Amino acid sequence: MRLLKSHSLLRLLNSYVVDSPQPANISYLWNFGSLLATCLVIQILTGCFLAMHYQSHVDFAFNSVEHIMRDVNNGWLIRYTHANVASFFFIFVYGHIGRNLYYGSYKSPRVLVWSIGVIILVLMIAIGFLGYVLPYGQMSLWGATVITNLLSAIPLFGKDLVELIWGGFSVSNATLNRFFSLHYILPFLLAALALAHLIALHTHGSNNPNGISSNGDRIAIHPYFMFKDLITIFFFFLVLSIIVFYYPNLLGHSDNYIEANPMSTPASIVPEWYLLPYYAILRSIPNKLLGVLAMFGSLFILLILPLVDVSRIRGNQFRPAMKLAFWFFVVNFIILMWIGSQHPESPYLEIGQVATAFYFIWFLFIVPAIGLAENTLMDIAIESK
């Protein structure tokens, strides 16, 4: 341990992951960070091994994935691990965001940490979409066609931008090559952003369930929180192993085991489950341009949360009204996920429109209104004394 404190580089590592003081009362909900770091490492390692055998060519991509599954030693294990850890990545990131929303971890002085986190989420979605195209099954081809076509809604240069991304007049060999290159490179940018996220967090330390400063009651990460993190990491490995060995296609789509055919459109074109809420928001607005703006806006609206939450109390632990509003938001998000998997017809269309409206109203009106009401009642109570 003496080396950790004497060596110039190891001393830096020691200050972040060994001796860093953390609030003594943080719960298992604060373990999402270590789980996400584990997922990122697994994805980069398995992705590098898969890239050794994958061929980014429209004629060979589908068969190269089958070759990995059938002929490469333990290729099936690497491929299924990569595919399922991607889903766990999003489960953990949604849990991480939900915990931050509930406990107000986005408020000052952690606005920079929150902002970097939102950028990481957007980049994760982009990487996930690019990866979904690479197996070049039916859902890969048509998902890529539908999602990239959305950019044609941009006035003046939208169609030119789509053709620039495609490298032609439709999803083709050039598109697959570009998507593969980006899918390989962007995770390293994601890792750099994750490091920046950690550095920004280190400045003021973690929030805690009470939402108040806990500088007088902190303990080092090692050994206390490190062993606490290992419990959830080992539990994650257990669940991942069960899914990879027994239910490897549980979170996938069966149509992606059919080779891509530009002449045959699937009955229902849906993205991966973790993109369904944004797909539902896109489809709920009849105007194409407004739908695209709403879809991207549903992500970037997270950035305004530190501004619209005017409450003097951090987190929802002692705020009954905001606690209720938070759970309404969670249920609404799950409804959007369900609507995104359904055909765009009545009554799913109407439910999606109501859920989309509530999503934006929650950020723009409900959060500031509850904060103002609480501040006003607090002022009245203080003045009456």
Image (cartoon, grey):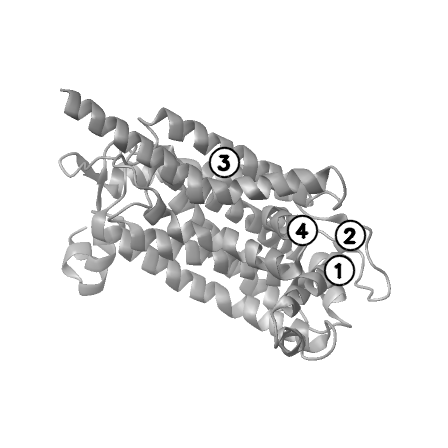
From the image, tell me which residue sits under label 4: 283
Q: Camera-side residue: 85 or 272? A: 272
359 to the left or right of 137:
left
Q: Nearer the viewer, mark 2 or mark 3?
A: 3
213 to the left or right of 102:
left
Please report contact status of discs 1 and 2: CB closer than 8 Å, yes or no.
yes
Indicate the amino acid at tag 2: Asp
Indicate the amino acid at tag 1: Gly
Of label 1 and label 4, which has the lower sequence position? 1
From the image, tell me which residue sits under label 3: 329
From this view, report whether residue 367 is shown above or below residue 61.
Answer: above
Of label 1 and label 3, which has the lower sequence position? 1
Q: Which label was assigned to residue 137?
A: 1
Residue found farthest to the top:
385
- Alpha carbon of mark 1 to alpha carbon of mark 3: how far? 34 Å
Within-10-Å neighbours for mark 2: few <14, some 14–19, many 20+: some
Please report contact status of discs 2 and 3: CB closer than 8 Å, yes or no.
no
Dot 4 lies on which element?
A: helix
Indicate the amino acid at tag 4: Arg
- Alpha carbon of mark 1 to alpha carbon of mark 4: how far? 23 Å
Within-10-Å neighbours for mark 1: few <14, some 14–19, many 20+: many
- Alpha carbon of mark 1 to alpha carbon of mark 2: how far? 7 Å
Indicate the amino acid at tag 3: Phe
